[in-house]
Amino acid sequence: MRMPIWIRQHVAAARALLVLTVVLGVAYPLAVFAVAQIPGLKSRADGSIVKTADGRAAGSALIGQSFTGKDGGPLRQYFQSRPSAAGDGYDPTSTAASNLGPEDVLDTLAVPATGVGAEQSLLTQVCSRSRAVGDLEGVDGGRPYCTPDGVGAVLKVFGTRAPDGTIPRPTRVVSANQSCPAAPFIAAYKGARVECARPGEDLASGLTVPVRGNAPAKPQVPPDAVTASGSGLDPHITPAYARLQAPRIAKARGISEAQVLAAVRHDQTGRTLGFMGEPVVNVVRLNLALDRDHPYRA
């Protein structure tokens, strides 16, 4: 006697469920786990953990770290990572970018009377970081479109607009990112005196004019020193940024610059498959290698 069709359908479904559970829920995970235990793959499957000279886990080679002191300032004996927008910096639970774009050039200035906080534009973040890196490494931190005090060099220009959108004869000019009583980065623009910005004032109707200034087209501070990665967790910097930091590291650790550069070259990896991406240096691995081979003595 044949079973009713609805029973046969349920039996077939139960068989399929059992087979797929065994294959996908047991066999496949065990196969992946077994492959992950193959020498050369196990460390990566376990999170690419890197250890100190005495065997303590120091983090993952895949996630950057902030090498700063209790006051948040950079530790001079360590290579510094690139900026991070993940949480308070390199927070794996808050991986993110800043979502700021190249046209984000105007700051929101703090208003003391209301307690409204300031919000830096991407341009000012780049300018302030470049100045800080320049001060730390003893080089010129100037960049195009940045003021000497480390904010975006942007004017808000008021007056009658010409058909091409410009304002030939401004009636008022404001240095939009320099809060009063700061001295504007230029005294005049097209014959009009440049004013500092008054916090809380609405400058939206003015024409936005970024000013390039006389900074070199190729700044001494490389781009990865002033911009964050998309994930906020990138542990790499460019060889150029590593070379910029080498003299400071050598002085702090009491070794020669050649020894520091040798460590950089040893840790440097080339382009993926020989043509994708750019050469990079893993800051976490590099700092661990320095601690192992050239311990810092305060």
Image (cartoon, grey):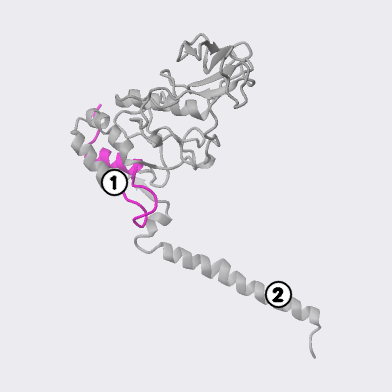
Q: Residues within 10 Å of mark 1 (few under 14, many from 20)?
A: some
Quarter of the image that includes the N terminus? bottom right
- Asked if residue 36 lies left or right of residue 86, the reply is left
Residue 13's disc is 2
Whichever of callouts 2 and 1 sits on the residue coming sooner in the sequence is 2
| Residue 290 belongs to magenta span | yes
Is residue 174 or residue 4 the one in the foreground? 174
Give the residue type at disc 2: Ala
Is residue 237 or residue 288 the one in the foreground? 237
Q: Are marks 2 and 1 in contact (CB under 8 Å)?
A: no
Q: Is residue 157 above or below residue 137?
A: above
Residue numbers of the magenta segment: 269-298
Q: Toward which corner of the image does residue 143 lie, by quadrant?
A: top left
Residue 267's disc is 1
Residue drawn where x is 49% and y is 28% of the image: 123
Q: Residues within 10 Å of mark 2 (few under 14, many from 20)?
A: few
Give the residue type at disc 1: Asp
Residue drawn where x is 36% and y is 34% of the image: 222
Q: Secondary structure at mark 1?
A: helix
Q: Toward which corner of the image does residue 246 lie, by quadrant?
A: top left
Residue 124's disc is none
Residue drawn where x is 41% and y is 38% of the image: 65
- Asked if residue 213 lies left or right of residue 220, the reply is right
| Residue 2 belongs to magenta span | no
Residue 107 in view (yes/no)? no
- Give the percent coordinates (x, y) of residue 130: 40, 27
Q: Is residue 228 above or below residue 141?
A: below
Residue 36 in view (yes/no)? yes
